[in-house]
Image (cartoon, grey):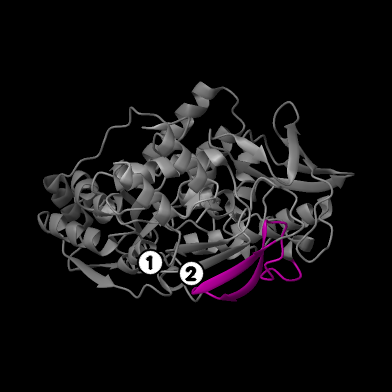
């Protein structure tokens, strides 16, 4: 690569030459368009953040039934919406550890039953009101309080008392929990004035952007918060978020330049997107999983033989091949995979076995069809996955009836309400967080209605176990219980597949959810 070409790339990266002219000059030097795009992308990344411009995000998962109350966030859109205007106490970093956000530092007593968080000073809410430790206390109190409908409620039920001493916020637990700071990184726990008790859906927080206009489940417009405390994120002057649930329309919007980034690129079009000029594809292994969930307390799924019949009737390898197109790994009817540090890789892999499925189905005593509800909004390719499941179940003598539900309202009307449906989980920072959110008997988001006393006892005991080997064994036992007795059919762990245009730069490694744990619109910057 010639010095002249490198000079041209630097000029374009610095905005001293527009892209069209750069590509023309590169072509005259005999450089291919693909090489020129790659070189320009590298030069832009190396040049560092640029302030200003409009960042446009096309996101999947939204619904007109969504709420601006962070406690009620149930999908990717709702999570992204609040991430822009809010801050948690701590957040996952790219290595899987924690970085301080509104908490500058934290520490625990000897057994991990009392945690102290030093709250950042000089931070204001977007309404100009100073953020204080009392606001932090009120926020956690609202999510953990009796009658809470928060998605984080299950994570916080072990809290015994909350208090404030000067700039310190103190959490006293009913028992030790070495993972408490990780639990407080949960995306529901955005700090709000008086905890959001007065106006939970006002979208007032300490985040890098201020919500200026929105049509719920359709579009959201943000302006930069001029008083934001962290100069390292929030580079664009304006962020526009548009909900595009249709996969084809979302990719078309990226290709045509209507949006600068999208989440949930359908695995079946990954190779096509990789060939699009000016588009970068990001496919990263994750703790995310695409699932079929059964309510263990609702007939006919209250019979474990029937649940096992359906689990053995699932061809997991076929799902990974035909639904994920290789962008993921085979699941094992547990939410925990190798993304978690205390994962046990010695649990026997469940495989498709129509004979075992038929035997369990006969033992269940059930007859007649079984209704499975699905939607594109549950996960990319979910209706196709349901049809594959229908075919493999048929070989075991199980008749699945597939009902395709409307995308809009799926998360309010179907998920966590209907007894058998397709769904997805993005995973959590720790095993405790994942199990506490969705499998603890008392969890509001226990979407399989799984109530198991032994599981609950192990989960509580593991929180206070400081010996990692013993703790790992406990988590292994919990995974086996869910696998063999629960209502989860987990055929596959999905990669997070996002795509960005060359108009923006700054993509980097992350842990958590898609779109760089939903920080991409704040950590990336506009260059074209």
> Percent x, y for residue 227?
77, 57
Is 345 in front, or is 505? 505
Q: Name the residue located 41 percent from the left edge and 38 percent from the top edge.
A: 5
User: Is 243 a magenta residue?
Assistant: no
The answer to whether residue 189 is seen in the rendering is yes
Q: Secondary structure at mark 1?
A: helix
Number of callouts: 2
> Percent x, y for residue 213?
62, 75
The tag on residue 275 is none
Q: Name the residue located 70 percent from the left edge and 28 percent from the top edge.
A: 111
Q: Which residue is mark 1?
A: 253
Task: Give the class, few, some or many, for how many residues have Cα within 10 Å of label 2's Cα (few <14, many ≥20).
Answer: many
Residue farthest right in this picture: 166
The tag on residue 242 is 2
> Percent x, y for residue 435?
49, 45
> Percent x, y for residue 175?
68, 37
Q: Secondary structure at mark 2?
A: strand
**In this picture, residue 145 sits left or right of residue 31:** right
Q: Is residue 491 above or below residue 237?
A: above
Circles 1 and 2: CB atoms closer than 8 Å: yes
Q: Magenta residues, as a range?
A: 197-224
């Amino acid at each position: 690569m010639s010095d002249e070409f490198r000079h041209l790339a630097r000029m374009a990266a610095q905005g001293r030459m527009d892209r069209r002219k750069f590509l023309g000059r590169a072509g005259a030097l005999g450089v291919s368009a693909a090489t020129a795009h790659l070189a320009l992308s590298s030069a832009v990344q190396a040049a560092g953040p640029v302030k200003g411009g409009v960042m446009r995000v096309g996101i999947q998962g939204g619904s007109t039934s969504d709420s601006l109350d962070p406690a009620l966030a149930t999908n990717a859109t709702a999570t992204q919406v609040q991430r822009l205007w809010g801050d948690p106490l701590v957040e996952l970093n790219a290595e899987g550890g924690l970085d301080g956000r509104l908490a500058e530092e934290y520490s625990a007593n000897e057994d991990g039953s009392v945690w102290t968080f030093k709250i950042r000073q000089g931070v204001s809410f977007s309404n100009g009101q100073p953020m204080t430790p009392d606001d932090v206390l009120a926020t956690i109190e609202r999510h953990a309080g009796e009658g809470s409908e928060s998605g984080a409620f299950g994570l916080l039920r072990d809290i015994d008392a909350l208090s404030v001493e000067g700039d310190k916020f103190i959490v006293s637990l009913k028992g030790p929990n070495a993972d408490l700071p990780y639990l407080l990184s949960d995306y529901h726990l955005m700090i709000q004035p008086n905890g959001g008790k007065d106006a939970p859906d006002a979208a007032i927080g300490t985040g890098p952007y201020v919500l200026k206009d929105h049509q719920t489940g359709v579009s959201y417009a943000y302006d930069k918060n001029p008083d934001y405390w962290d100069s390292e994120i929030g580079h664009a002057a304006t962020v526009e978020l548009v909900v595009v649930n249709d996969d084809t329309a979302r990719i078309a919007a990226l290709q045509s330049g209507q949006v600068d980034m999208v989440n949930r690129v359908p695995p079946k079009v990954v190779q096509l997107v990789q060939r699009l000029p000016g588009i970068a594809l990001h496919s990263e292994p994750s703790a995310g999983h695409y699932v079929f969930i059964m309510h263990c307390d609702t007939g006919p799924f209250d019979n474990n033989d029937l649940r096992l019949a359906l689990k053995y009737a699932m061809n997991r390898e076929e799902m990974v091949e035909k639904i994920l197109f290789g962008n993921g790994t085979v699941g094992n009817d547990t939410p925990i995979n190798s993304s978690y540090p205390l994962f046990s890789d010695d649990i026997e892999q469940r495989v498709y076995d129509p004979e075992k499925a038929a035997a369990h189905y006969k033992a269940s005593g059930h007859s007649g069809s079984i209704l499975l509800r699905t939607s594109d909004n549950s996960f990319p390719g979910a209706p196709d996955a349901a049809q594959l499941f229908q075919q493999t179940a048929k070989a075991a003598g199980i008749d699945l009836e597939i009902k395709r539900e409307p995308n809009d309202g799926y998360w309010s009307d179907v998920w966590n309400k209907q007894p058998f449906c397709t769904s997805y989980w993005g995973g959590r920072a720790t095993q405790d967080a994942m199990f506490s959110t969705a499998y603890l008997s008392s969890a509001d988001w226990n979407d399989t209605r799984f109530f198991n006393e032994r599981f609950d006892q192990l989960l509580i005991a593991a929180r206070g176990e400081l010996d990692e080997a013993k703790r790992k064994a406990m988590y292994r036992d919990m995974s086996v219980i869910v696998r063999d007795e629960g209502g989860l059919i987990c055929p596959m762990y999905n990669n997070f597949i996002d795509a960005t245009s060359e108009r923006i730069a700054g993509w980097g490694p992350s842990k958590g959810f898609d779109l760089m744990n939903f920080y991409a619109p704040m950590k990336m910057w506009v260059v074209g």
